[in-house]
Image: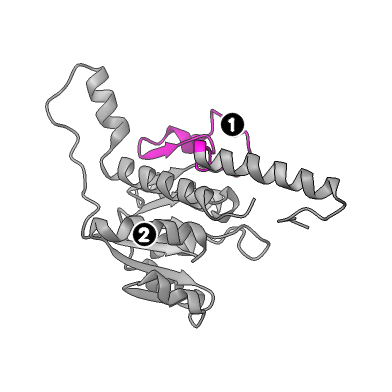
Amino acid sequence: MPTSGNNADSVAEHGLLLTLALLRQLPAAQANVSAGSTLGAPLGRMLAGRTVCLYGLGATAMALARRLRPMGVRLIAITRDLAAPKVTEFALDECFSSSERDKALAKTDVLVLCVRLAHQTRGLVDASALAALPAGAILVNAARGGLIDYRALREALSTGHLGGVGVDVFWTEPFPTDDPILSFPNVIATPHVGGVTDRSYSDIADAVAYNIERLRRGEPPLNRAA
């Protein structure tokens, strides 16, 4: 399935969910209610007025941009090709080339990964990238787990440099339930459900049925990975 249409919209909504849940400390708020406290804690942070950086400008990033813009954020991005025609469609406040990555990250309050995993992008968010983020920045990954250097992320969490991490994808799946990263209170993890919605799955079912019909007619399937 191509990462467009309802699939991109679904993943974008989930990325926004993780972002808001981290800013408003949703797990701590739920824990307070469970403990019998309804006294207005913890203190959350607003999304409005913050700088959100989209790392990669594909279909999911476009779906995110459309949702983030009305929320009053400052929207920036990192992309390989600044001259690509699609860049103007995002109506970004600033756009940086991959070689200017750290310059963009230094301005970022919320970093959302929208990059495809390939040999060149594995470990893309490494120790230097995490260090370039301001203290307290939030990292959200609903793309692919391998984009982040695991050891670098664990270290950034251990030192308290990151304000929160939201992950829907992992380095190995299924992910060990006793992994140290899951023990940090400012980590929200979901089980790879970004694209698991009624509309996304309906599209997938239609695409599978259509490809079966193509194969029956002796035609090659669409959207082949290789």
Q: Secondary structure at mark 2?
A: helix
Which residue sits furthest right? 218
Picture quadrant of residue 103: bottom left
Q: Which mark is residue 17?
A: none
Q: Give the x, y percent position of residue 164.
A: 36, 46
Q: Which residues are magenta?
A: 170-198
Please indicate whether residue 18 sits to the left or right of residue 220 in the image: left
Looking at the picture, which amino acid does disc 2 mark?
Answer: Arg
Q: Is residue 9 visible?
A: yes
Asked whether 195 or 167 is in front, the reply is: 195
Identity of the residue drawn at 46% across and 50% down? 9
Position above or below: 140 against 93: above
User: Which residue, given by chain and number where applicable, does mark 2 sit on?
Assistant: 66
Q: Give the x, y percent position of residue 123.
A: 58, 58
| Sequence-first disc among 1 and 2 | 2
Picture quadrant of residue 121: bottom right
Q: How many marks?
A: 2
